[in-house]
């Protein structure tokens, strides 16, 4: 037989007793008392350590929930979390995580089992203080030391990883919009918050269930009474337990001790008396022994008069409910095995009689239970009645080695040889338990704490470690991304600044040049138009020379033709000036367009001269022909010259002959002729002169009307300020067209500047957002790192032995 260690030291600092330690001389009474007292102290110390770990984990769970809620809010509102490509892998290629195990064990299928154990199981679940939603997990291996944000951690997330499948292909999260990723992460964070709340409920739950089973008449009920230090269950030399009896603290029944006999465990409700029958304590033996067909189970609410630290049912750290099962036989093996596999059962205690060892039923149960509970707490009862204790131990340990190797490997902690019947059950008794039984109690409490650690504390710690590691990785990666964004945006701003300033300078200079070129062109057009029209008006007389004189009888029509000719001639010059203005304006548009394309991208011309000066208005100078236009008594230049010559001769002659001599001569002639003869001579002379004058006027009428109409036309042009008006109009038309091209350049410059300013504004906003993001994720990183260190410091593995997860 393999040797069993005889010198092992408990993880909690207490020295354990080897199964072969009985070869030593029997210790004295004082030594037994000291050992018993030490075992109780060890149990109390273990409970305090477990309680401290629970409280610390509860605080850390609340802190992690705060971080998740903060991430959830910021992810929606201001700082959407981004997932680097290194954190995303195709599901088919993803290796199994090497980090702390967080996946819960799948629920046990019970469809193939009888309905009875399932119903009883439901009743047991409802008797817990808290309803647990999560299933138990195997005890995870020891976590590796925290290595913050190494490449190994950043390669894949274990909890906050977002995998989205569409059809048979894995969708790359990089291809999704930021808002889509934010929504996916929000759902994942919500799941984390729900799971953290469940973990908090599990850790805070102090209830635990211990199933006591074994062969018929092995002393299971006696063992339960010994643990409670009170005769609660009926015990007899013959098998008397025919149903499952669960012993719970009376505090779960409002402090009232009671016994509930339950016909249908699935319908049991403590607050509904119709679902159970309350029986008196004196009738319990008969109910347990003979009414197994009528009732499926008993729930016994009892008080523990011992102190809180000594109490097994209610000590504030782990409140144990003891379940006494019927003795194993062919009919009850499967039922009890189903019980043993349930998640609420933290410990299975197998009671075997030292007199009978393991029967076939006991071996079959251990084989079945070992599939789910690798470690079984074994109590070898009635050991004091055995003479050759060493041989008994050797045989039983050899059987355990074959039935449950894991239990055998930790036999010092899991296999106990005691006599439960020797425990004093008298209330208030000061008799100390045997050291072996005291040690059994200590190891049972430790084993319960160990299994609770595996099912509650370790999963909670592992989940917190993995979640905080994911938060660390995301915070670090998003901080790094924000730093890259900050550097990139800052560099872009710095590179873009000269171009932006140059664009502003180009805008001011180019618009000024465009305005100057356009204005000079307009002024040149106006000057050219004035010169053309002035020249036309000065030479307008040549137009009248081309009109054929039709004779004196059509002289009115002749005058009308001269007036129309003068108007048409000037209008023709106006049209020519407009054409010249179009050509000059078109050339100026080309120059302005080239100025624009020199600094801007190529773009089509916006202005066109096709519609320039096309308004259909009568721009002729109209003069009306009047009767006075046919008579011109005003001296022209020639007549004025003659008048001046005659005046000069008169002045000289008067000086030569003298005025006096001339007057004297006239009077001398009149005296010689006589007044009568003078009147007779004057009439014919006046008639002849009149006829001559008439002939002169008629013969000069064609020239007079031309002279008169030309003067009249020029006066009309001058009075209407026609030349200035037309030059201003043509200039306005040209300026209007040139402004279209100038406005196009201005608009393009404005749009270019606005686009540049918008881009710079976006980059400045990116810089500001990146700075805020860096600060935010740096804060999240610091908080999560500190919290992760605190979670790592929570000692959960020291509460158990070296055994693996039950």
Image (cartoon, rainbow, N blue to C red):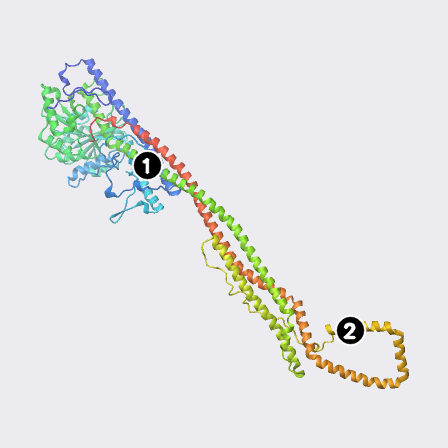
**Marks 2 and 1, how far apart at CA:** 118 Å
Q: In this view, does 443 lie above or below 614?
A: above
State the image coordinates of residue 372 (x, y, percent, origin top left).
Answer: 17, 34
N-terminal of the two: label 2 or label 1? Answer: 1
Query: Which numbered disc covers residue 473?
Result: 1
The answer to whether residue 172 of the structure is visible from this angle is yes
Say what secondary structure mark 1 lies in.
Answer: helix
Say what secondary structure mark 2 lies in.
Answer: helix
Label 2: which residue? Answer: 643
Out of 255 and 393, give the one closest to the viewer.
393
Tell whether 642 sits left or right of 409.
Answer: right
Q: Is residue 71 above or below residue 594?
A: above
Tell whether 448 sits left or right of 400.
Answer: right
State the image coordinates of residue 42 (x, y, percent, origin top left).
Answer: 24, 21
The answer to whether residue 256 of the structure is visible from this angle is no
Out of 201 and 789, give the one closest to the viewer.
789
Out of 345 and 329, give the one closest to the viewer.
345
Within-10-Å neighbours for mark 2: few <14, some 14–19, many 20+: few
Identify the residue shown where x is 8% and y is 31%. Answer: 360
State the image coordinates of residue 694 (x, y, percent, origin top left).
Answer: 74, 82
Out of 372 and 620, give the one closest to the viewer.
620
């Amino acid at each position: 037989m393999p040797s069993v260690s005889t010198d092992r030291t408990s993880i909690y600092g207490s020295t354990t007793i080897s199964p072969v330690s009985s070869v030593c001389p029997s210790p004295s009474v004082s030594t037994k008392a000291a050992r018993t007292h030490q075992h109780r102290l060890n149990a109390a110390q273990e409970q305090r350590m477990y309680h401290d770990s629970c409280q610390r984990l509860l605080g850390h769970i609340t802190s992690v929930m705060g971080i998740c809620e903060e991430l959830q809010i910021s992810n929606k509102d201001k700082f959407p979390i981004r997932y680097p490509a290194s954190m995303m892998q195709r599901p088919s290629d993803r290796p199994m995580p090497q980090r702390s195990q967080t996946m819960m064990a799948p629920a046990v299928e019970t469809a193939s089992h009888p309905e009875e154990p399932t119903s009883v199981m439901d009743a047991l679940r409802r008797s817990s203080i808290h309803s647990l939603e999560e299933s138990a997990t195997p005890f995870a291996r020891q976590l590796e030391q925290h290595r913050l944000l190494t490449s190994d951690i950043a390669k894949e997330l274990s909890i906050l990883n977002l995998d989205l499948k569409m059809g048979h292909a894995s969708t790359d999260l990089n291809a999704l919009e930021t808002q889509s990723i934010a929504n996916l992460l929000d759902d994942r964070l919500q799941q984390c918050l729900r799971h953290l709340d469940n973990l908090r409920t599990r850790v805070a739950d102090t209830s635990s269930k211990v199933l006591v089973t074994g062969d018929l008449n092995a002393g299971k009920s006696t063992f339960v009474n010994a643990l409670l230090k009170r005769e609660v269950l009926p015990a007899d030399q013959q098998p008397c337990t025919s149903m499952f009896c669960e012993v719970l603290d009376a505090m779960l029944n409002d402090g009232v001790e009671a016994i509930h006999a339950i016909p249908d465990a699935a319908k049991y409700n403590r607050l509904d008396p119709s679902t159970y029958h309350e029986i008196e304590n004196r009738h319990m033996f008969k109910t347990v022994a003979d009414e197994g067909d009528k009732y499926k189970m008993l729930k016994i609410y009892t008080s523990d008069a011992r102190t809180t630290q000594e109490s097994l049912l209610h000590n504030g750290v782990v409140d144990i409910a003891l379940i006494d099962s019927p003795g194993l036989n062919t009919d009850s093996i499967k039922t009890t095995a189903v019980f043993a596999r349930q998640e609420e059962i933290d410990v299975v205690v197998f009671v075997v009689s030292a007199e009978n060892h393991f029967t076939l039923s006991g071996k079959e149960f251990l084989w079945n239970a070992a599939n789910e509970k690798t470690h079984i707490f074994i109590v070898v009862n009635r050991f004091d009645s055995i003479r050759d204790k060493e041989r008994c131990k050797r045989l039983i340990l050899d059987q355990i080695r074959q039935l449950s190797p894991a239990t055998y490997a930790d036999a010092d902690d899991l296999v106990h040889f005691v006599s439960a019947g020797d425990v004093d059950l008298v209330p208030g008794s000061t008799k100390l338990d045997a050291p072996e039984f005291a040690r059994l109690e200590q190891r049972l409490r430790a084993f319960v704490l160990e299994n609770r650690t595996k099912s509650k504390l370790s999963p909670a710690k592992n989940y917190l470690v993995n979640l905080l590691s994911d938060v660390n990785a995301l915070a670090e990666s998003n901080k790094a991304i924000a730093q890259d964004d900050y550097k990139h945006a800052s560099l872009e701003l710095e590179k873009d600044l000269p171009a932006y300033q140059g664009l502003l300078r180009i805008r001011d200079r180019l618009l000024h040049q465009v305005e100057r070129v356009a204005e000079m062109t307009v002024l040149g057009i106006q000057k050219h138009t004035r010169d053309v029209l002035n020249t036309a008006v000065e030479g307008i007389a040549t137009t009248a020379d081309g009109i054929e004189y039709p004779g004196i009888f059509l002289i009115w029509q002749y005058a009308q033709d001269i007036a129309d000719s003068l108007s048409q001639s000037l209008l023709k010059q106006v049209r020519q000036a407009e054409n010249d203005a179009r050509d000059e304006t078109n050339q100026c548009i080309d120059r302005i367009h080239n100025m624009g394309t020199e600094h801007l991208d190529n773009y089509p011309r916006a202005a066109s001269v096709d519609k320039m000066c096309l308004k259909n208005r009568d721009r002729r100078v109209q003069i009306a022909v009047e009767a006075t236009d046919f008579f011109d008594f005003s001296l022209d230049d020639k007549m004025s010259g003659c008048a001046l010559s005659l005046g000069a001769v008169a002045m000289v002659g008067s000086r030569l002959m003298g005025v006096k001599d001339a007057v004297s001569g006239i009077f001398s002639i009149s005296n010689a002729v006589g007044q009568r003869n003078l009147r007779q001579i004057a009439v014919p002379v006046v008639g002849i002169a009149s006829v001559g004058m008439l002939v002169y006027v008629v013969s000069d009428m064609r020239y007079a009307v031309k002279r008169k109409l030309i003067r009249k036309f020029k006066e009309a042009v001058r009075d209407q300020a026609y030349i200035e008006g037309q030059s201003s109009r043509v200039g306005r038309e040209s300026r209007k067209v040139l402004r279209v091209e100038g406005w196009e350049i201005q608009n393009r410059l404005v749009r270019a500047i606005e686009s540049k300013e918008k881009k710079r504004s976006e980059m400045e906003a990116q810089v500001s957002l990146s700075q805020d993001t860096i600060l935010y994720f740096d804060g999240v990183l610091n908080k999560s790192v500190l919290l992760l260190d605190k979670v790592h410091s929570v000692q959960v593995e020291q509460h158990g032995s070296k055994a693996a997860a039950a």
